[in-house]
Image (cartoon, helix red, strand yellow):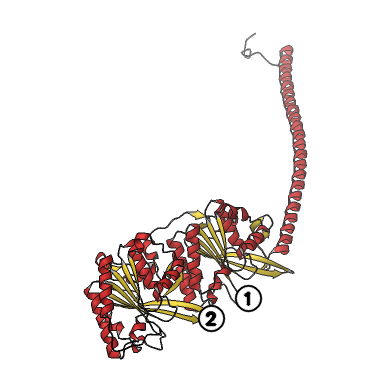
Amino acid sequence: MKPIQPSASHAERKSPTGIAGFDAITGGGLPRGRTTLLVGGPGSGKTVFALQFLVHGVQHDKEPGIFVAFEESSHSILANAASFGWNLTASQRKKVFFLDAQPQPDLIQSGDFDFCGMLAALEAQAKAIGARRIVFDALDIVLALLPDPQAQRREIYRLHDWLLARGLTGIITLKADTDETNAISQQPFGFMQFMVDCAVILNHSVVLGVSQRNLRVQKFRGSSFDENESPFLIGNSGFEIAGARTLDNIDTHFTTERVSSGVERLDTMLGGGYYRSASVLVTGFSGTAKTTLSGAFAQAACRRGERTLFVSFDSEGGEVIRNLASVGIRLERYVKSGVLRMASARAITGSAETYLVRIKALAREHRARCVVIDPVSTWSKSGTDLTAHSVAERLIDWSKADGTTLLCTRLLDEMSSPAEGSSPLQISAQVDTWIHLNYLVQAGERNRGLSIIKSRGTAHSNQVRELILSDSGVTLADIYTAGGEVLMGTLRWEKERAERVANEAAEVAGKLKRVRLDAEEAELQVRLKSLQTELVAKQIEKALLLSSSKSRAGDVSRDRTRLEELRGADAAPHGAAGSTP
């Protein structure tokens, strides 16, 4: 269910608690001028919640408050709260009044009593400081001193009416068993849930040996709210609810900017690298170089001057730096410069929610633009499957909303498959880019392969590449197939060498053939010139012969004519025939 977006009228009728996640799921905070019941077992965080509500009112809303403590002394409460960093100024401290109302251990009750005297004193104090908020912590302690349920009910209604009459925003905390098998309404003072305007249930349980804290708003009169349970932590700054998802408020900001993966050829396969603010998942069995690929990404980010957080669940930061240096990834100088922060998650204990909140806090503190979590699959062992999946969703939502480029690795066991069907995280369906690493044992060698299973919004390569690690860095190489068998490592190298030898032999043969053809061509050119010369000679001889024949024919004709002229009588002159003597 999405967080409620309060309208202006709703916001005016609510008092912010300062607990961002809670204000999101209630649409603004607690009902202003009304009473809220806060119920939970021991260690569930009731006092911290109530105290944070008062502190926020003084620091940010200029609403003074009163804290009535029926169980712990004010000195103990303030000492416990000092670790949360709620630094009140001297003037702000005067706006928060603590009333110690703990029954004395040696108290001997004589006759009936009621809340009238206490309420009269509180009213005077509220007017003195202008109080707008008030907390009654562990009210059940003093109610137990009343003689019967009727008297308890009477005083509870007296307190409730007093709060409403003075328009105070009140919180009443009660101890109760929040186990689902034991309905709170059936427990002592359970009727208060029907009386108040808002009821919040805090639950602290242990699931599979892992501490789990959850909050649920049971009712909120006159307002919509998220009815589902929301996990929370009591962290360094107090109450931290991790269940609120704020991505829908700002998911209109997207970019087409690319960032390098740290491996040049992988960038080419991805069409230019990862998208800025994208979520990337690298899966693979143990030893397939998931951490190496993560280190390459971190190094590329640091080279761009982008502050980066590297969270390792497997090794200490120094070990990761040393191991990555063996494959040409040098991170030490970036750690020294402050651009890169190495964090060992072994120091974090608790549920998956604890991991998420701590990592978010580290990222905010470091102002990280890129975050690496190696491996995120550790979270699947920290609680229930549903919790792990929910945390994975919020991790990705947070990174996108914060504009952080996120790279996570997930360790596969030997029996699992890249489809991740049995993984409680189910993170592969949520990430933008999914890269899978595997290995092939062949001819006594174990070689690594890389493939891109998906990359949203990117025309990515569907080819498998061999991932090669050396002291000079990380590279990708083409694989070879022979007879339907994939060749990597030495077999691929032998195949490449055989192809190189074959290409060289073919090139030499080609050169020899070109030399032979050139010689034959030259020989033919010589023969051609000789024939052309012979042809010209024949043509000249023929011309001379023809000319000589024509000359002889002319001479014969002239000689015959001359002979005829000399003979005279051989032919009668023209016109002489028929003459008379």
Asked if residue 478 can be seen in this view, the reply is: no
Q: CA distance from mark 1 to mark 2?
A: 26 Å
* x and y, in percent, of residue 146 in the image: 31, 88
Quarter of the view holding residue 243: bottom left
Return the residue found at the far top. Answer: 581
* x and y, in percent, of residue 244 in the image: 39, 69
**Labelled pair 1, 2 in contact (Cβ < 8 Å):** no
Label at residue 303 = none
Q: Which residue is mark 2?
A: 209
* x and y, in percent, of residue 314 in the image: 61, 68
Q: Amino acid at mark 1?
A: Glu
Q: Which residue is mark 1?
A: 414
Residue situated in front as seen by the camera: 526 or 137: 137
Q: Residue placed at 47% from the left, 76% from the top?
A: 387
Return the residue found at the far bottom. Answer: 148
N-term-proximal mark, 1 vs 2: 2
Q: Amino acid at mark 2?
A: Gly
Q: Residue placed at 62% from the left, 65% from the top?
A: 316
Quarter of the view holding residue 141: bottom left
Asked if residue 359 can be seen in this view, the reply is: yes
Question: In this picture, is 195 found above or below 575?
Answer: below
Question: In this picture, is 371 found above or below 140?
Answer: above
Q: Nearer the viewer, mark 1 or mark 2?
A: 2
Secondary structure, mark 1, is loop
Residue situated in front as seen by the camera: 281 or 326: 326
Q: Residue placed at 35% from the left, 87% from the top?
A: 144
Q: In this rendering, would 177 be left or right of 127?
A: right
Residue situated in front as seen by the camera: 573 or 214: 214
